[in-house]
Amino acid sequence: MAENWVTKWYSKFIKMPFIMRQEMKAEERKIFRFLRHMRFYVYKKIPVDVREKHFVTRGLQEQTTAEKDAKNVVEEEFKLAFNAQVEGTLTLREIEEIDKALLEHEIMHGSIGYEAQFGKKQLLILAAAQGEDKKVYFTYLEPAIKEAENKGDHKALMAQIRRMGTSQLNTLSAIALRLEIRAASRNLRKLRADNQLIKHSLAEWDNAKHDKQAAEQHLKIALAEAEIDMERDLHNETLITMRDFLLVLLTLQCLNDDADNMMQYYRDNVMPKIPEEEHIMDVEEIKKKLAEHAHTLAQGLRRILAAEEHAEKLAKQVEAVAETGKRATA
């Protein structure tokens, strides 16, 4: 049974951004190490030992090793994608806090002069993020999940990858292996600082008796920094998520090929049938686990899309209140 996304989220969200970043970098390294090792065994080592050297016992042991790699890579891929989702929800929470602070101040004092532009910019940023999220969601995950739910089994992800040609998978492989985690969590930390600076600037404006220009300039700078950081943060999280799904597809390709190879080995009488059938069942269990993880991640992506829509509504409110209300005066 798939894990509940909310329950798992509460075990992660209290961590500091730099801890999240270190976790994600470690998960990335493990994924590449396990996936490369598994692919080496499935496509090079095992075929040579089984077909050319006729090492039956060694071949069975190597298949077990490849399956251990597969279990590890599936777990790390899930952890990486989940951490990216946690970051996404925390980023949207900071954006919501900024909007609420601006709205509250606008309602009490009117617009200082920069809120409307900030709302417009935020809408553009969220539109881009929603477009990227939806591309990941509907291209790689949601159709597979719906298919699995309709069938009542966990075959959908395998069907998804079998519909993709070898050339397309090779292209995805090149993209996935080029993407790296660099700025993960850095912009979230900056956005949190922007949030506090915006609130401080608003309080500074309130406390200024006559000359409010300094406070207005501080707010302008803080809002500009927030725009930059939220745009980078949302984009980086989407890149991590997209890369992780590409790696999941590569993992599925390798698992499917491994099972097909084992079936062909015993059909060609180069490996015993019963042990190979047992290994094939083990591979199917790994793919089932991957599909369960995908169900959990689908819950998270749905929540992120809903949070983005809520942030969009707040941004529209910030813009509307600023444009309809009078500019605040001393």
Image: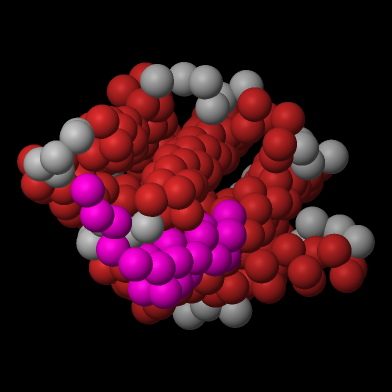
Identity of the residue drawn at 27% across and 68% down: 117
Residue 1 forms part of the magenta stretch: no
Residue 45 in picture, x, y percent from top left: 40, 42
In the drawing, does residue 107 fall left or right of residue 283? left
247 is higher (above) or lower (below) than 137: above
Identity of the residue drawn at 62% across and 22% down: 11
Quadrant of the rendered structure where residue 319 is? bottom left
Residue 134 in picture, x, y percent from top left: 52, 70
Q: Is residue 195 in view from this perspective? A: yes
Residue 315 forms part of the magenta stretch: yes
Residue 223 in picture, x, y percent from top left: 23, 50
The one nearer the camera, 283 or 205, is 205
Identity of the residue drawn at 14% across and 40% down: 210
242 is higher (above) or lower (below) than 121: above
Quadrant of the rendered structure where residue 20 is? top left
Identity of the residue drawn at 79% across and 57% down: 154
The one nearer the camera, 138 or 245, is 138
